[in-house]
């Protein structure tokens, strides 16, 4: 691509900010900090197979799951890249049991940052794409510093959300409520450059992503819907890395499903760190996300580590899933 045609992420953010005269630049600065952390983590992900950072940390997170060394590293990088600039008032991470407060020596800002620092990290040992998911809310608490109240907001109140995928290339996809845009890291210049402008997910899915091994644990309604889909010309693709599955379906059209089951009746995926931010991205791209009965962005979080079922992707298919679960079998497209 000619140099004069290259649009870097920094340039794109500045141009977008100029469309809003009331903008203060604080949100833009958070996005800059996130891109710096993404470059650092992306570099370490590529090196993980040859350095000691690969493997188990012999610890578990708040969910009782194994934590890899790279999980801990990514969490530390994103926290330290964003907590000092005076833009963030509070952080929350999938890897931390409670909110992460801004150190007293740093100023407190006007936004809350929530993140899954390294989604799908259990797959890194087999060289599968993994990613980071982030969500940004405006501060609503009254104190000088942030509180858990700033994190427990409806997904529809997000001011920005996105993800970074670390794969054959490192790509950042985000929205601030005005469309979804993707940027690919060009290692020759060390910059994210615009590669996917105004992403729109196809109305109908061509791909279904679901862990079929859980079929026997699902409710009869979900089993019936899965059987129904077998009569449609869909390709089955399930990686088991949420960011990777979602990214592919966003670009090509698909539905990702993680239903509740007998072992996890409340669902498996985290509302604040996975479902809500990706739902915001999906809807900004023309898609839809549901827990099977309600819009993900309308769910009021009750605690930091709340889990939900997730159906996300092409709007017709997600609404069809809702219809089958409710017994209607025909999607309500109004």
Image (tube, grey):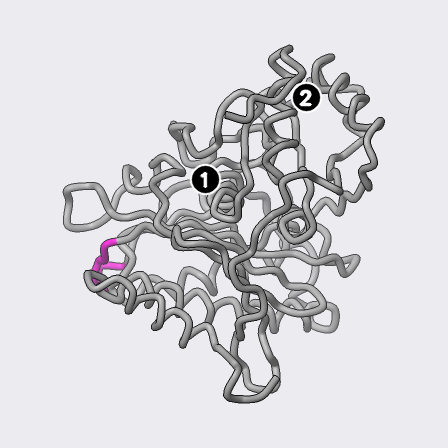
Q: Which mark is residue 261?
A: 2
Q: Residue at x 65, y 56 (%)?
A: 130
Residue 258, percent across and down?
66, 32
Q: Is residue 246 magenta?
A: no
Q: Which mark is residue 272?
A: 1
Q: Residue at x 50, y 25 (%)?
A: 334
Marks 2/1: CA distance? 20 Å
- What segment is highlighted magenta in the picture? 103-110
Q: Quadrant of residue 27?
A: bottom left
Residue 289, percent across and down?
54, 35
Disc 2, SS: loop
Q: Residues within 10 Å of mark 2 (few under 14, many from 20)?
A: some
Q: Report the side of 237 relative to 321 (left or right).
A: right
Q: Quadrant of residue 235?
A: top right
Q: Is residue 318 above or below residue 330?
A: below
Q: Is residue 272 above or below residue 266?
A: below
Q: Is residue 7 above or below residue 156?
A: below
Q: Main secondary structure of the magenta part?
A: loop
Q: Counting residues from the N terminus, which is met first, the one under dot 2 or under dot 1?
A: 2
């Amino acid at each position: 691509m000619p140099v004069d045609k290259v649009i870097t992420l920094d340039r794109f953010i500045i141009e977008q900010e100029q469309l809003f005269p009331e903008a203060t630049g604080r949100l833009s600065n958070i996005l800059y900090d996130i891109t710096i952390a993404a470059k650092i983590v992306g570099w370490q992900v590529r090196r993980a197979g040859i350095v000691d950072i690969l493997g188990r940390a012999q610890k578990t997170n708040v969910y009782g799951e194994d934590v890899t060394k790279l999980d801990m590293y990514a969490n530390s990088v994103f926290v330290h890249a964003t907590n000092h600039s005076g833009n963030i008032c509070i952080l929350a991470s999938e890897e931390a049991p409670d909110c992460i407060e801004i150190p007293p020596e740093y100023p407190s800002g006007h936004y809350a940052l929530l993140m899954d620092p390294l989604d799908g990290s259990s797959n890194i040992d087999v060289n599968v794409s993994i990613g980071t998911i982030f969500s940004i809310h405006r501060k609503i608490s009254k104190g000088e510093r942030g509180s858990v109240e700033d994190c427990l907001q409806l997904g529809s109140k997000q001011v920005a959300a996105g993800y970074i995928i670390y794969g054959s290339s490192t790509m950042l996809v985000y929205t601030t409520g005005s469309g979804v845009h993707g940027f690919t890291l060009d290692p020759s210049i060390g910059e994210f450059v615009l590669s996917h402008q105004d992403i729109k997910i196809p109305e109908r899915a061509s791909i279904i992503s679901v862990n079929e091994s859980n079929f026997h644990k699902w409710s009869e309604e979900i089993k019936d819907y899965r059987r129904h889909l077998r009569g449609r010309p869909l390709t089955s693709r399930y990686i088991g890395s949420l960011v990777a599955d979602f990214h592919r379906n966003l670009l090509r059209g698909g539905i990702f499903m993680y239903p509740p089951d007998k072992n996890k009746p409340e669902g498996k995926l985290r509302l604040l760190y996975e479902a809500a931010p990706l739902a915001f991205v999906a809807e900004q791209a023309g898609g839809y996300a549901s827990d099977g009965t309600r819009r993900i962005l309308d769910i009021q979080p009750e605690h930091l580590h709340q889990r939900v079922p997730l159906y996300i992707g092409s709007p017709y298919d997600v609404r069809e899933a809702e219809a089958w679960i409710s017994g209607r079998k025909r999607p309500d497209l109004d």
